[in-house]
Image (cartoon, rainbow, N blue to C red):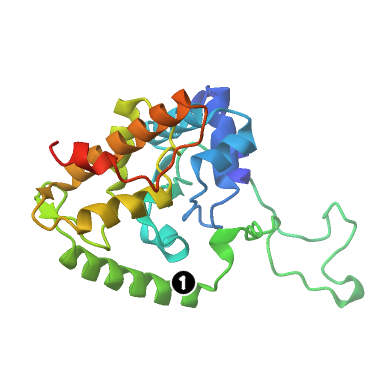
Amino acid sequence: MSWALSLPTESLKDSSARHVLLCLANYAGSNGAGAFPSASTLAQDTGLSERTVRYKLDDLEKVGLIQKGNQAIAAVHIDRHDRRPVVYDLQLSRGANPAPRTKRGADDATGCNSQQNEVQPGTERGAVAAPNPSLNHQVTEEQLQRELADEIARQEQAAANFPPNDQRFAMFAKWVPDAKSLEDQIAIAGLPDDSVPDCAIRKFKGFFVAKPNMFDSGAGWCYRLVQWVKRERVKAAGQGQEPDFNDTSWGDDLGGL
């Protein structure tokens, strides 16, 4: 965070973007890497809307103050890939000037010298930034490396078993909607970001797993899923009720999409 605070004004004139950067830095390691707070978390920290936070993150990436880091770090802590926030690395070499440091000695402002009380200081001024006690630092470096290796192996195995997003396939029990395809379809349908709950995905898969002769691409299945959710929400709103995702009558209509 001290790096973000020391950025000169000309490096980042947008006060909102600076605020987002300061809060993002609070979740990074001492080397500036591995920060993965969600947009909603940054929105709470900054008081900005989630949409504004995303815009400011894009702006910070464009000016080179942050860049996308190792996304497997978030995967270690969050199983569902469509729920994982983006992992960012702060570009500590950009923008800020290093703070000057002087060795302790007879002229030290504390009044101590190298001979008093047998004190023999051998380090420079300026303490190394304390590690942030956040989710990013709940495991040791060695444990993190092992978990990252296991997660990468698991992802490679999963990629070998899951069809590409543009390939048509029959629905299967372990299908997980592609995060971007699902987000795009939700935006196109005009639904809130959190409008497709896990229970809806489970019911959707349960219905179509029983129809092995029906094929669609990953994006197509996301379209069907969002259309069903939208239909249930509209119907429930007209009746003044909550959406009933146990009702599978929608499946007959979606079968012809």
**Image-based side of 100 in relation to 189, left or right:** right
Judge whether 223 appears above or below 89 on screen: above
Judge whether 72 appears above or below 224 on screen: below
Classify the position of the N terminus by image quarter: top right
Q: Measured from the top left, where is residue 224 in percent x and y?
A: 23, 39
Q: Measured from the top left, where is residue 85 in percent x and y?
A: 44, 48
In the image, what residue occupies the spot 78% across and 73% down?
A: 120
**Image-based side of 16 in relation to 178, left or right:** right
Q: How crowded is the residue under tag 1: few (<14 C-alpha within 10 Å), some, or many (20+)?
A: some
Q: Quadrant of residue 152?
A: bottom left
Q: Secondary structure at mark 1?
A: helix
Classify the position of the C terminus by image quarter: top left
Residue type marked 1 = Leu
Q: Quadrant of residue 117?
A: bottom right
Pick the residue in front: 190 or 111. Answer: 190
Pick the residue in front: 11 or 146. Answer: 146
Residue 232 seen in the figure: yes
In the image, what residue occupies the spot 62% across and 33% down?
A: 46
Pick the residue in front: 23 or 228. Answer: 228
**Image-based side of 39 in relation to 233, left or right:** right
Q: Quadrant of residue 172?
A: bottom left
In the image, what residue occupies the spot 45% across and 31% down?
A: 236
Q: Measured from the top left, where is residue 103 in percent x and y?
A: 71, 59
In the image, what residue occupies the spot 40% across and 32% down?
A: 58
Pick the residue in front: 82 or 115. Answer: 82
Q: Which residue is mark 1?
A: 144
Q: Measured from the top left, where is residue 253 in percent x and y?
A: 20, 36
Counting the numbered discs, the total is 1
Judge whether 142 appears above or below 221 on screen: below
Residue 84 seen in the figure: no
